[in-house]
Image (cartoon, helix red, strand yellow):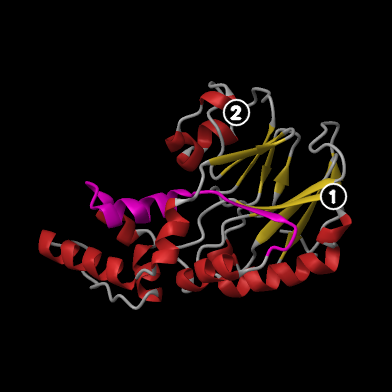
């Protein structure tokens, strides 16, 4: 773990962004609005968006579940004024699972056991403590979730994109399948892949910026930039300020 909230810039040989551009990539928030607000304050002490000709905020997904403030996180992201910066919101596996639950997809009730209970609670929907639900109970929960979820929040979730690229950086929630070309990835891998990507040694055409897999500290190894530091349990939400050839990590 970093002993300081902000690390020194880490340089690699690879050019990440061209010109005077910057990306602030934010790792998995998981319902921790308190940490998100604190992180933005930390970031504004390190840099000013106006210093760059182009500024992007790229959120790597998993805004909801596990932490207590999923509703508050989404509301904050919807209401924030980004001024001249461009926000990019990626879909994580937890958002996909929530949408599957709302749609009544087969097996989607599993979402209730890995964070869905906390998300529904943040919207004022009580979830019974029993682990198994009858079809009638699941229908009642789905109906209650639809009734409690503001239309603006549903649209936010439905509009999430699975990837984003800028110059030599490719952003996805979980990573990529190293055996496929970057432009031939499937959505499930972009949102769910783990070991095959993390343990791979094959060079990638672009630097992949991702969350999804919690690590004790942010990672930049010349191949990938990993920004999930398990915020919901560690109280450490991390971001990476990416510029021409450098990455500066900022954590709560």
At which x and y percent is residue 204? Answer: 66, 25
Query: Picture quarter containing residue 102?
Result: bottom left
- Secondary structure beneath dot 2 equals loop
Q: Nearer the viewer, residue 155 or 61?
A: 155
| Structural distance between the alpha carbons of marks 2 and 1 | 35 Å
Q: Nearer the viewer, residue 143 or 115?
A: 143
On screen, residue 203 versus residue 95, left or right, reads right
Relative height, residue 205 to residue 63 (above, below):
above
**Residue in view at x 58 percent, y 50 percent:** 60
Relative height, residue 143 to residue 98 (above, below):
below
Q: Which label lies toward us, 2 or 1?
A: 1
Residue segment shown in magenta:
82-108
**Residue in view at x 86 percent, y 31 percent:** 13
Res 200 label: 2
**Pointer 2 and pointer 1: residues touching (CB < 8 Å)?**
no
**Residue in view at x 57 percent, y 72 percent:** 33
Q: Can residue 115 be seen here?
A: yes
Residue 244 lies within the magenta run: no
- Secondary structure beneath dot 1 equals loop
Q: Earlier in the sequence, mark 2 or mark 1?
A: 1
At which x and y percent is residue 212? Answer: 53, 48
On screen, residue 71 versus residue 97, left or right, reads right
């Amino acid at each position: 773990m970093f002993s300081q909230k902000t690390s020194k810039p880490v340089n690699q040989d690879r050019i990440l962004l061209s010109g005077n551009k910057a990306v602030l990539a934010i790792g998995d928030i998981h319902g921790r609005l308190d940490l998100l607000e604190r992180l933005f304050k930390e970031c504004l002490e390190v840099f000013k968006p106006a210093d760059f000709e182009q500024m992007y905020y790229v959120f790597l997904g998993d805004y909801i579940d596990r932490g207590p403030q999923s509703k508050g996180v989404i509301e904050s992201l919807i209401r924030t004024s980004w001024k001249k910066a461009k926000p990019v919101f990626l879909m994580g596996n937890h958002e996909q699972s929530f949408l599957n639950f709302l749609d009544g997809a087969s097996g989607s009730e599993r979402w209730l056991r890995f964070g869905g209970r906390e998300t529904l609670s943040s919207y004022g929907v009580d979830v019974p403590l029993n682990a198994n639900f009858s079809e009638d109970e699941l229908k009642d929960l789905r109906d209650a979730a639809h009734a409690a979820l503001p239309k603006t929040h549903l649209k936010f979730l439905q509009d999430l994109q699975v990837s984003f690229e800028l110059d030599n950086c490719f952003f996805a929630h979980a990573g990529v399948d190293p055996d496929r070309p970057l432009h031939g990835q499937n959505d499930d891998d972009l949102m769910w892949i783990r070991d095959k990507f993390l343990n791979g040694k094959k060079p990638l055409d672009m630097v992949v910026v991702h969350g999804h897999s919690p690590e004790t500290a942010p990672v930049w190894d010349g191949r990938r930039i990993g920004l999930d530091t398990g915020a919901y349990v560690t109280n450490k939400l991390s971001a990476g300020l990416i510029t021409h050839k450098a990455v500066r990590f900022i954590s709560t």
